[in-house]
Image: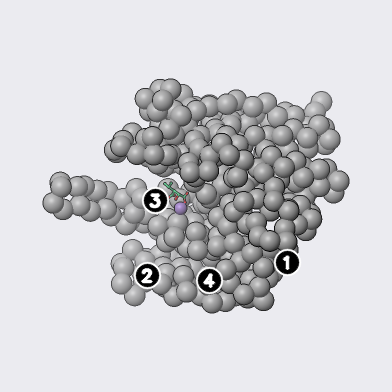
Amino acid sequence: MSKTYKITVMPGDGIGAEVMAESIKLLDALSARLGFKFEYNEQAAGGAAIDKYNDPMPDSVIAACKLSDATLLGAMGGPKWDHHTGAMRPESGLLKIRKELGVFANLRPVSVPAALADSSPLRPEAVSGVDLLTVRELIGGIYFGKPVGNDGFEAFNTMRYTVPEIERVARVAFEWARKRRNKVTSVDKANVLDVSRLWRDTVKQLHAAEFSDVELNHLYIDNATMQVVLNPRQFDVILTSNLFGDILSDTTATLGGSLGLLPSASLGTKYGLFEPVHGSAPDIAGQGKANPVAMILSSSMMLDFLGETKAAAAIRKGYEAALAQGLRTADLWREGYKKASTSEMGRVICEETLKSL
Ligand code: IPM
Ligand code: MN
């Protein structure tokens, strides 16, 4: 009996559908070759769900995600829905699905293979070989803290964390570090914020109690943002809160020259949500310019989560082989490289992935 995985697929808005299509082709090719199956359940999300249900994340969509083995998400939002406020915003739908699935740890890996080093805005010798993983807390902190309010004159949000919330995400970071280069850098603003002082103390205590074999250091967010640019190779695992992780992960994304390369996995104790870090890029939607790599690498993270580690690794090899061939989508293309559309890039990654098996 071959194994069948139920996958909820939410292409979302803008370039979401194009990049998702490339991922699905690749997943189908892999499953046909390796003898497992995917059963897809497509659902609207974000702007598409506002159009269909007048709700960016209806409970029925969340229920579908909870019934599946994993969820793939393209991107959400766009100018068409920008006039919406509060819970009707596509972004609110994204926060809702993360919260409902309890995916408190958001993994955002960045590596710069040699073939990409000269696409970076930084010197190739500074970025070549970078391999870091940001573990961002995803369902707490200032994104969700109460009280929150805006009376038109004064507005406020609240950055709150409890010890158990900090511990559970820190544990994920330490565990990943053990599988990688055994180093965690925890990023906070403990020189100013009480919530960061609790963060730092909690990380230190957990480290002493359970992870003293892992190297741990602490940086303030302002310094960390600078260090990521000055000397990105010093980082292995970066552990940080929701807001700081949002900012820092966009910074790390530039190391390889494009946000279009950065995948993510959001994990809790049960569910997995896999989405590229980039947005819906409405300005280039439908033109074959989108880079499918972030979505494809997100699918590879999903395969790891499902236990299909061989397929997951094959995708990473396929991606590097496509780069080594000189193929670049519009975001990364320069003189001397072969310009690829979204689907050409997807096709070559797929061919190379299968070849590597
Ligand atoms: C991200 C995005 C989201 C976030 C937005 C769209 C809500 O920027 O996933 O990084 O801030 O988490
Ligand atoms: Mn972001």
- Report the residue marked by disc 3: 140
- Report the residue marked by disc 4: 228
- Report the residue marked by disc 2: 189
Q: Residue at x 37, y 66 (%)?
A: 196
Measured in 3D between alpha carbons, the distance from the residue under mark 4 to the one under mark 1, in whole angstroms, is 18 Å
x, y percentage for residue 151?
15, 46
**In contact (CB < 8 Å): disc 2 and disc 1:** no
Q: Residue at x 51, y 59 (%)?
A: 249
Measured in 3D between alpha carbons, the distance from the residue under mark 3 to the one under mark 4, in whole angstroms, is 24 Å
Name the foreground residue: 236 vs 338.
Answer: 338
Q: Mark 2 or 1, which is nearer the eye?
A: 1
Q: Dot 3, how many residues are within 10 Å of its Cα: few (below 14), some (14-19), or many (20+)?
A: some
Q: Residue at x 27, y 53 (%)?
A: 157
Q: Secondary structure at mark 3?
A: loop
Amino acid at the residue labelled 2: Lys
Q: Quadrant of residue 125?
A: bottom right
Measured in 3D between alpha carbons, the distance from the residue under mark 4 to the one under mark 2, in whole angstroms, is 16 Å
Q: Is residue 320 visible?
A: no
Q: Mark 4 or 1, which is nearer the eye?
A: 1
- Report the residue marked by disc 1: 114
Amino acid at the residue labelled 1: Ala
Q: Residue at x 61, y 62 (%)?
A: 256
Q: Mark 1 or 3, which is nearer the eye?
A: 1
Mark closest to the chain's N terminus, 3 or 2 = 3
